[in-house]
Image (cartoon, helix red, strand yellow):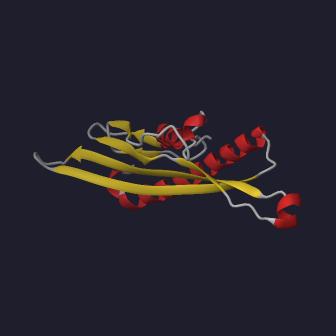
């Protein structure tokens, strides 16, 4: 996933940092730890490609609050439909919750200014029971791609709405 084609958001800050607060449990039902691309890596890529520091004071901090991908077994139908039909057996749900905060000293001594933008993006995919390992990996990749788009759309809109004074 790439955000380079999107217009960068130029913030009047001197630095940009990422703070990952979400810790993957490393066990079911979570599956993000089994893949090289995770919701957290989406947030990191977004910050690297979309935010540009153009100022001489202050900082922007993108805090990842949730970066989970949950795998859920779906109930199977019985009867002939269940025996002969290809049923959905897995639902993947990805969530990327983050907060972007811009902090900087005000124009007058002792003043402090802060702006924030919150986003809680999600995406889901279902997988057929007949899906091969490659098809399951492709479903995960499509899930992360969808999550990345939802995250980008939501956070970009929120930054434009709430951070007008520090957007250049």
- Spot occupied by residue 20 in the image (x, y as percentages of width and height): 40, 39
Look at the picture and state if 24 lies above or below 88.
Answer: above
- Spot occupied by residue 73 in the image (x, y as percentages of width and height): 65, 54
The quarter of the image holding the N terminus is top right
Going by the image, does 63 lie left or right of 46?
Answer: left
Closest to the observer: 109 or 153?
153
Going by the image, does 82 lie left or right of 119?
Answer: right
Q: Residue at x 77, y 43 (%)?
A: 135
- Spot occupied by residue 41 in the image (x, y as percentages of width and height): 52, 38
Res. 23 in view: yes
Identify the image quadrant of residue 125. Answer: bottom right
- Spot occupied by residue 83 in the image (x, y as percentages of width and height): 86, 59
**Number of numbered discs visible in the structure rendering:** 0
Q: Residue at x 50, y 45 (%)?
A: 8
Going by the image, does 121 lie left or right of 116?
Answer: right
Q: Residue at x 37, y 37 (%)?
A: 16
Res. 153 in view: no
Q: Residue furthest left?
A: 110
Closest to the observer: 146 or 166?
146
Q: Residue at x 74, y 61 (%)?
A: 76
Look at the picture and state if 150 lies above or below 24.
Answer: below
């Amino acid at each position: 996933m790439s955000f380079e084609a999107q217009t960068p958001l130029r913030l009047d800050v001197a630095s940009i940092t990422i703070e990952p607060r979400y810790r993957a449990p490393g066990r079911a039902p979570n599956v993000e730890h089994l893949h090289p691309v995770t919701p957290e890596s989406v947030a990191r890529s977004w910050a690297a490609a979309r935010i540009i520091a153009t100022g001489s004071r202050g900082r922007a901090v993108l805090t990842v609050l949730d970066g989970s991908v949950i795998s859920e077994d779906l109930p199977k139908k019985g009867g002939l439909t269940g025996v002969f039909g290809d049923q959905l057996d897995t639902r993947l749900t990805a969530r990327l919750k983050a907060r972007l905060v811009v902090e900087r000293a005000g124009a007058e001594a002792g003043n402090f200014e802060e702006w924030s933008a919150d986003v809680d993006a999600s995406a889901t995919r279902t997988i057929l029971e007949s899906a091969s390992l490659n098809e399951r990996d492709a479903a995960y990749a499509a899930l992360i791609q969808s999550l990345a788009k939802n995250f980008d759309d939501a956070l970009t809109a929120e930054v434009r709405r709430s951070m007008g004074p520090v957007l250049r």
